[in-house]
């Protein structure tokens, strides 16, 4: 293995910017529901349509799906599981600003928003301003409902992208006639999309139905997002004697999926750097030392991340060295 020493070691620094919600396989779907998907009129879904565990999808045709349809199959089930994880992720995000229920007529910059009343409504136009950052993320957390008025709209300016807008809805969402909504709706219960609505995003319902009526749902182009990782640490012998070689093995895995992370793992003893090892083709990094002095050593493995993978740290392994 290649060992590289670095001057300062610590957990990967937190990015001050809001990170996107990782949708996993649910990102492929324009419409995803649990109980039923019901359509009236010439709706167009640009993206996959999925249902699990329900089996009733009606109204296609006259509706059209420009993608795959998955009804109560393994792909729909996995997408629902990934949706649940994404919903929980969004719900757990720290709020950066508590704002009024009515979002119409306002401009919001990147961040995580909720309201004291636990609901959101849009009458008129909500403007999302990325301030020139194409990676800017907007998360709106409604404890209960999201309701948009007829002919309302969400406008994106200065580089904002619908792929980075997320609506976490604690019960149900209702989109008013001929309104325009941008972003991914993740509703705990149902989503009702009334006549003539355009959704530049996704309508994803965890436990109930998605209802459509002569609408256009267009899944946004998937933005490349770094994937979360988990790091674990094992030791070859514990306790060990002074001067005895001890091998620490870090294992880094992708949180969602089976891709193998690449990059470097730092091994530390409290705040002291022991060494930095490159992950091998199986996602493992090993570091061997015989230089530990007598005592208890809190050893940690810190994966520093790489292109496409977020960093992560292992729990401490307490290595006892005796004389």
Image (cartoon, helix red, strand yellow):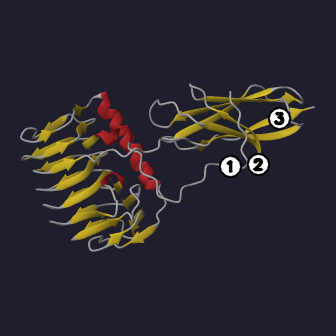
Can you tell which quarter of the image residue 257 is in?
top left
Q: Secondary structure at mark 1?
A: loop
Residue at horizontal 42 percent and vertical 51 percent from the top: 20
Q: Nearer the viewer, residue 22 or 98?
A: 22
Can you tell which quarter of the image residue 99 is in?
bottom left
**Closer to the eye: label 3 or 2:** 2
Q: Which residue is mark 1?
A: 10
Quadrant, the N terminus: top right
Q: Nearer the viewer, residue 4 or 118?
A: 4
Say few, some or many: other residues with alpha carbon within 10 Å of mark 1 (under 14 / 14 to 19 / 20 or more): some
Say few, some or many: other residues with alpha carbon within 10 Å of mark 2 (under 14 / 14 to 19 / 20 or more): few
> Which of the two labelled residues, at mark 1 and mark 3, occupies the earlier sequence position?
1
Q: How far from the left and from the top, in percent, is residue 13?
A: 60, 53
Q: Secondary structure at mark 3?
A: strand
> Which of the two labelled residues, at mark 1 and mark 2, occupies the earlier sequence position?
1
Q: How far from the left and from the top, in percent, is residue 18?
A: 46, 57
Q: Which residue is mark 2?
A: 271
Marks 3 and 2, Cα distance to the nearest angstrom? 17 Å
On the rendered structure, is 282 left or right of 96? Answer: right
Q: Which residue is mark 3?
A: 320
């Amino acid at each position: 293995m290649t060992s590289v020493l670095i001057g300062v070691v610590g957990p990967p620094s937190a990015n001050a910017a809001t990170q996107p919600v990782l949708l996993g396989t649910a990102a492929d779907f324009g419409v995803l529901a649990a109980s039923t998907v019901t359509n009236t009129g010439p709706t167009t879904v640009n993206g996959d349509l999925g249902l699990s565990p329900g089996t009733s999808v009606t109204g296609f045709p006259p509706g059209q799906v420009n993608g795959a349809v998955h009804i109560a199959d393994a792909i729909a089930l996995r997408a629902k599981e990934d949706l649940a994880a994404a919903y929980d992720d969004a719900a757990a995000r720290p709020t950066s600003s508590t704002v009024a229920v009515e979002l119409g007529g306002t401009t919001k910059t990147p961040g995580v928003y909720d309201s004291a009343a636990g609901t959101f409504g849009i009458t008129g136009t909500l403007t999302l301003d990325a301030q020139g950052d194409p990676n800017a993320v907007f998360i709106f957390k409604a404890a209960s409902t999201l309701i948009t008025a007829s002919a309302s709209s969400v406008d994106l300016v200065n580089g904002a992208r619908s792929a980075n807008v997320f609506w976490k809805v604690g019960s149900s969402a209702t989109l008013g006639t001929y309104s325009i909504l941008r972003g991914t709706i993740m509703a705990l219960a149902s989503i009702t999309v009334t006549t003539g609505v355009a959704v530049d995003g996704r309508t994803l319902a965890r436990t109930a139905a998605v209802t459509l009526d002569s609408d256009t749902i267009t899944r946004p182009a998937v933005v490349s997002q770094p994937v979360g990782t988990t790091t674990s640490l094992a030791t070859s012998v514990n306790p060990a004697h002074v001067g005895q070689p001890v091998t620490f093995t870090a294992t880094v895995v992708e949180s969602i999926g089976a891709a193998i992370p690449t990059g470097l793992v730092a091994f530390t003893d409290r705040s002291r750097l022991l060494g930095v090892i490159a992950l091998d083709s199986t996602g493992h990094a090993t570091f061997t030392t015989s230089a530990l002095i007598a005592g208890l050593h809190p050893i940690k493995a810190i994966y520093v991340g790489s292109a496409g993978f977020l960093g992560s740290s292992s729990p401490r392994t307490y290595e006892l060295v005796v004389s």
